[in-house]
Image (cartoon, rainbow, N blue to C red):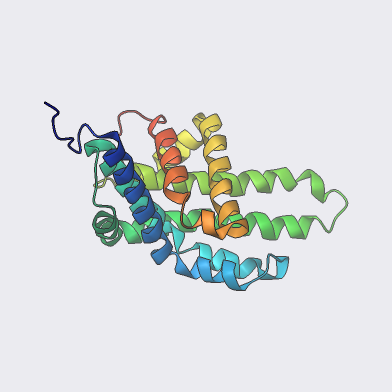
Amino acid sequence: MFSKPTFENNIYMKIFRWAYIILMGNLSLLIVTFPFFLVVACLAIDARNIVWFLLALISFGPGIISLFAVINEFKANGDVEPVRFFFRAYRQFWKKGFFYWLIGILGIMIGVVDSLFFLNYSWGRWVLPFFIIIACLALIVSINSCYFQVRNPQSSSKKVIGLAFYYAVKKWYVSLLNMALLGAIYGLMILKPQFGFVITPTILFGIIYLNASKLHQITQ
């Protein structure tokens, strides 16, 4: 006699469920970051449009922290209702997600503006790496802060940012890897929107989450 396959022992059902979670996570992120989607769809990749791209990126803060919450729930329980949990986390964390992400956006703005200013001088190229490091460090602190806040929802923002900065510097190799993944996420969104918005975000942010989980195993 053959037993009737169940969700627990049917690999095809599991794959379908995982694909559903990934797709719904991507669509939920797309909804809350729609301003960035509009900018990508309507504006050319041009230095004159960089301000619009940066402003639109602000919407990602609450979206990233909410997606991390979905991934955290899935990792803990092996399943999650992606849309419902995403927007529940959005209501819980959106203010802190916005605040943490603003650190990264300000870091990018400082890096870009100061780089353009100093490039007017012959020696300006020598200080360019410094501003690139500032921008990258600010972004990694933002990502780490979102992760640590999800893992420690009761922790204060000051404690979370301090922990995020400490591990961004101490585990610099993880920071570089997550920076590359973050660049891949936005690169795909801009160059291949059909993949960048609909297929890859949850997968790549999931890898970033797993990398961040190696920074500090006990985050209590």
| Viewer-side residue, 140 vs 199 | 199
Q: Residue furthest left?
A: 1
- The number of discs equals 0
Residue at image location 33% in from the left, 50% down from the top: 20
Q: Is residue 44 above or below residue 138?
A: below
Seen in the image, is 32 located left or right of residue 58?
left
Residue at image location 24% in from the left, 58% down from the top: 84
Residue 175 visible? The answer is yes
Residue 142, percent from left and from top: 46, 49
Q: Residue furthest front?
A: 1
Seen in the image, is 70 located left or right of residue 164?
left
Residue at image location 57% in from the left, 64% down from the top: 54
User: Where's the N terminus, which quadrant?
Assistant: top left
Q: Is residue 89 above or below residue 125?
A: below
Residue 144, percent from left and from top: 43, 42
Residue 32, percent from left and from top: 39, 65
Residue 74, percent from left and from top: 28, 42
Residue at image location 30% in from the left, 59% down from the top: 90
